[in-house]
């Protein structure tokens, strides 16, 4: 079997690399030479685009033209920050559906819903709707959503908790930030370079999640050990939710340090070529 | 000021690197040519030492001779495993006091003692005895101890909890494994290449730690936010305990993801040149 040798070119704004553009997309961008300077070595924004608004507007116009030609399925009219790290000032913003094609660094909020402690701990797990563009029918966290530009992590968390699981605001506010996990992989849309902020949300015994936005088919309440087995033995979980779930199971002692591979897991959850913050 | 350019040579057993030997120690080991093969490029065990017992015995004899000459202060008659990772079979064992001189990978058990949750969370913090060889008078965790060969992590945890903080076994057993942190630094004894298994221990409101083995001067019960400030603004904590404490504060949401530097902290706590497991 011949390996797909698709090549990525650095996507630069001024001299800063902010993503990786797949060959196929780079070729399409040649048609927008007032916006993109495409060479064999890189894709960069045209020199005149020297501020946030100008970059955003020019790129958005090009992407919308490509969208009309059938690219960027799942357009959401929701913008992601384009930056080298979460805490750095964004250089521009870009439609979320185009982020993988440009290999942008993106961020999400992960909310692990649970109840009980120790042996009695149970996790709420969602099954994604069969109609979702990404990961249809896969298992997911209680709530899991991309972090758009312009709202805080907690605001996004409250919104996702409500839309995905019907968690009221006063309960969602009790979610506790606990970790960040990173992953980098290739899928048919491009390169996913993502860091997820993981929050734990302890739910009262009488709370039952119910989906509001139609993106979740059903919820399960499973013992932590069962979730652990599913993660180890199946690929039922969508990849990023698997990372967030494993992180939770490590932090709550369900995956024990005596387990061979424990240290590789702890390390791997937070590994990124250049670290998480740059 | 001239920088100290002390060089380290790889310490090998067969072809496997298991540590880094400082120049000064390497020179001393030349006197034991039946045990150590010392070249400018490496220190390795003599070829005939081809099993755990033979290696351990030969090296121990050499180290005891050097000890008689005044080296390896703080000899404890407690052995550490010599291996490339925690879950791999050890190739030999070595006196703990010699581990930094050989730059061995070592492991410890960290126990963060706390009570309460959210804003009301408090941590128990120890002040190390002024007579300790390492870090006298520094702040430390409730319990913090090197992991010797031949006993499990939990057994070591119960032992350290009792000796350092008078925690009875049934309470110590409730400690929950939650993480591992790594650090690599140089001190005047050599290279510290350490991975610490971090456990959280929730203590009842009426429990007050009391030191048993004379290695702790006093215990403090401080709000988590105060511990956070001490870690950020002072160097009162001994280095490894600072790592375990920061890890706890991240996992319990005291250090929030909105904090600039958060992702560098989360990543840095678990970074090691070759990962944690190899």
Image: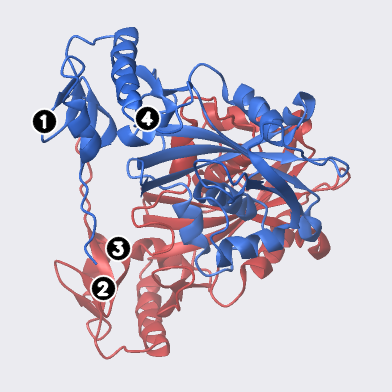
Chain colours: A blue, B red
Circle nearer the viewer, 4 or 2: 4
Residue at image position (21%, 75%) is B30
The subunit carrying tag 2 is: B
Label 3 and label 4 in one chain = no
Earlier in the chain: of badge 3 and badge 2, it is: 3
Q: Left or right? Give the position of A13 relative to B106.
A: left
Give x and y (percent) for residue A166: 75, 32
Residue B128 seen from this side: no
Residue at image position (43%, 28%) is A96
Residue at image position (45%, 74%) is B88
Instruction: Count residues near mark 3 (Cα–Cα under 10 Å), then give few for <14, some for 14-19, many for 20+.
Output: many
Label 4 and label 1 in one chain = yes
Circle nearer the viewer, 4 or 1: 4
Give x and y (percent) for residue A188: 35, 46
The residue singled out by tag 2 in the image is B29
Q: Quadrant of the N terminus of chain A?
A: bottom left
Depth order, front residue of A215/B57: A215
Q: Which image quadrant for residue B222?
A: top right
The local secondary structure at tag 2 comes to: helix
Give x and y (percent) for residue B164: 69, 56
Alpha carbon of mark 3 to alpha carbon of mark 2: how far? 13 Å
Circle nearer the viewer, 3 or 4: 4
Circle nearer the viewer, 3 or 1: 1
The local secondary structure at tag 3 comes to: strand
* Mark identifier at residue B20: 3
Asked if the residue under mark 1 is in contact with the one under mark 3, i.e. CB atoms within 8 Å, the reply is: no
The residue singled out by tag 1 in the image is A39
Circle nearer the viewer, 3 or 2: 3
Alpha carbon of mark 4 to alpha carbon of mark 2: how far? 61 Å
The residue singled out by tag 4 in the image is A98
């Amino acid at each position: 079997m011949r390996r797909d040798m698709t090549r990525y070119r650095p996507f630069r704004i001024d001299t800063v690399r902010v993503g990786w553009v797949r060959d196929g997309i780079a070729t399409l961008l040649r048609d927008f030479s007032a916006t993109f300077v495409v060479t064999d070595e890189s894709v960069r924004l045209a020199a005149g685009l020297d501020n946030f608004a100008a970059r955003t507007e020019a790129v958005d116009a090009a992407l919308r033209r490509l969208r009309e030609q059938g690219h960027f399925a799942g357009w959401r009219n929701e913008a992601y920050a384009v930056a080298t790290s979460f805490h750095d000032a964004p250089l521009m913003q870009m439609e979320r559906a185009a982020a993988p094609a440009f290999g942008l660094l993106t961020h999400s909020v992960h909310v692990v819903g649970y109840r009980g402690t120790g042996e009695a701990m149970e996790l709420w797990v969602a099954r994604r709707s069969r109609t979702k563009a990404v990961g249809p029918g896969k298992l997911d966290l209680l709530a899991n959503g991309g972090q758009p530009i312009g709202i805080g992590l907690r605001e996004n968390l409250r919104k996702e908790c409500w839309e995905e699981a019907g968690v009221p605001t006063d309960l969602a506010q009790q979610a506790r930030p606990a970790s960040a996990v990173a992953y980098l992989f290739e899928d048919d849309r491009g390169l996913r370079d993502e860091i997820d902020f993981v929050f734990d949300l302890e739910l009262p015994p009488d709370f039952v999640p119910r989906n509001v936005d139609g993106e979740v088919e059903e919820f399960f309440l499973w013992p932590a050990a069962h979730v652990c087995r599913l993660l180890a033995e199946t690929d039922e979980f969508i990849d990023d939710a698997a990372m967030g779930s494993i992180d939770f199971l490590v932090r709550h002692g369900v995956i024990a340090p005596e387990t061979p591979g424990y240290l590789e897991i702890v390390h791997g959850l937070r590994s990124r070529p250049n670290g998480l913050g740059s």
